[in-house]
Image (cartoon, rainbow, N blue to C red):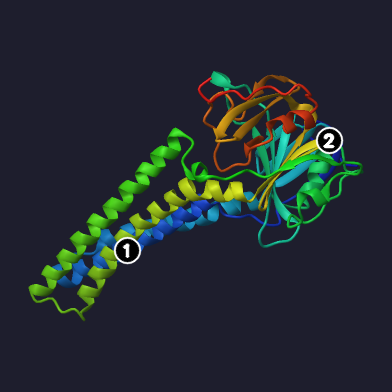
Amino acid sequence: MRQDSLFGERILWTGSPREARTPLTAKAVAAVSLGLTLVAVAFGIVQVLALGMSAAPAFLFALGSATFGALVLSLPAWWAGGARYLVTQNHVISERGPFRRTIDRRAISYARISWSPRLPGVGDLELVRAVPTGALWRRLAITLVGIENPDGVWAIVRNAQKDAATGHGSLPIAQRLDREERVLWTARPLTTLRSYLPTRSSDWAQALLTVLLVGVSGLLTARDVSFLRRALQVGLDARSLIFGALVTGLALGVLIILGLAVLLGYTTLVQRARSLHATRYLITNKRVLIQRGREELHLDRARIVDLIETRAGPGTLNVFLVLDGPRARAVATGGAFGQAERGADLLPIFECVQDGDGVRRALGEPDAKPPISHAA
């Protein structure tokens, strides 16, 4: 077999992206840029036809905004599409031109797989390493974007390719267990009204910003309607190009603000509860598995060093799996000590479960501990 030039190690697998998806944030920024482009063009037309002014500044802004939006929409996929990935004896490597990132296979704590909604058997494989909590906290992960058979690649990384049963992400994760792997405990989160409420200070700030944006869009709508009425009263023809450009520019400005409010409100208030509803937790004799729609988390039981429980609501608990790994003796809590890192990513946390004792028994801790209050 070939050897890697950096470490001189035997290459076990090599691949490149079959699909490079544009992140949702980049799509939102591109949509806002397109809206601002149309607004600038509309007001440029008004400047020329109604005021007799030069529209060069407005059109230059529109050109810059359109260019920026196109770059934001295309650059992430272009950059990811040119990558090359390698799995060697001891490392996972991501290369893109002169840039190279590596992670030690033995230090990987867990993996996340995000299956493609368009290409069967293709998805992103993110390898995450446990890192210290507190002041030394940092993010340490490497993502293999749009690779074919990501669960098969993960089986190579964890030295289980002979036992792994790979398959398409549309199958339940319980149907893709390793050979001689059996389920010991399974549960789904119990969603309540509290599940729709923000859980972090940043989420509360987004919720407040959502309310402010809705209020601003309402005020702008009232002001724009009043302005258009006055324009008609002074003799502006409602069928003229000037009036159409005014309506288009003002309406697009309000829609941009309202669209941002809807996006923030959805990600803050709705997405979390919908994600919990689509989540399933499994503990097997080998691993901890979490499936949420097209997303999966795979965690070796040997990485778990402790469990921390906090109350999630009446009769429910959040169970945090505290991880450790070689060459990283400090643990990563995934938010157990009030660390505000929970977000859209799938993390080793059992949220809103009722059977905390069952989790401890399945993980080999027969002496179940009483839940710890959130204040404690």
The x and y percentages for residue 319 are 64, 31
The location of residue 321, given as percent across then percent down, is 68, 29
How many C-alpha atoms fall within 10 Å of the one at disc 1: few (<14), some, or many (≥20)?
some
Q: Residue at x 63, y 49 (%)?
A: 80
Number of numbered discs visible in the structure rendering: 2
Q: Which residue is mark 2?
A: 286
The nearer-to-camera label among 2 and 1 is 2
Query: Which amino acid type is marked by label 2?
Result: Lys
**Cα gap from disc 2 to disc 1, whole angstroms:** 54 Å
> Residue 250 placed where, x, y %?
26, 63
Closer to us: 43 or 232: 232
Q: Is residue 53 visible?
A: no
User: Could you tell which of marks 2 and 1 lies nearer the N-terminus?
Assistant: 1
On the rendered image, what quadrant is the N terminus found in? top right
Q: At numbered mark 2, what does the secondary structure look like: helix, strand or loop?
A: loop
- State whether residue 31 is above or below residue 102: below
Few, some or many residues within 10 Å of mark 2 (<14, 14–19, 20+):
some
- Asked whether the beta carbons under mark 2 and mark 1 sit within 8 Å of each other, the answer is no
Is 34 on the left-hand or right-hand side of 105?
A: left
User: Which numbered disc covers residue 203?
Assistant: none
Q: Relative to 281, does residue 63 appear above or below in the rendering?
A: below
Q: Please name whichever residue, 34 or 59, is drawn nearer the observer in this view of the structure.
A: 34
Q: Residue furthest bottom?
A: 239
Residue designated by label 1: 252
User: Is residue 84 something that shows in the picture?
Assistant: yes
Which quadrant holds residue 62? bottom left
* Front one among 60 and 90: 90
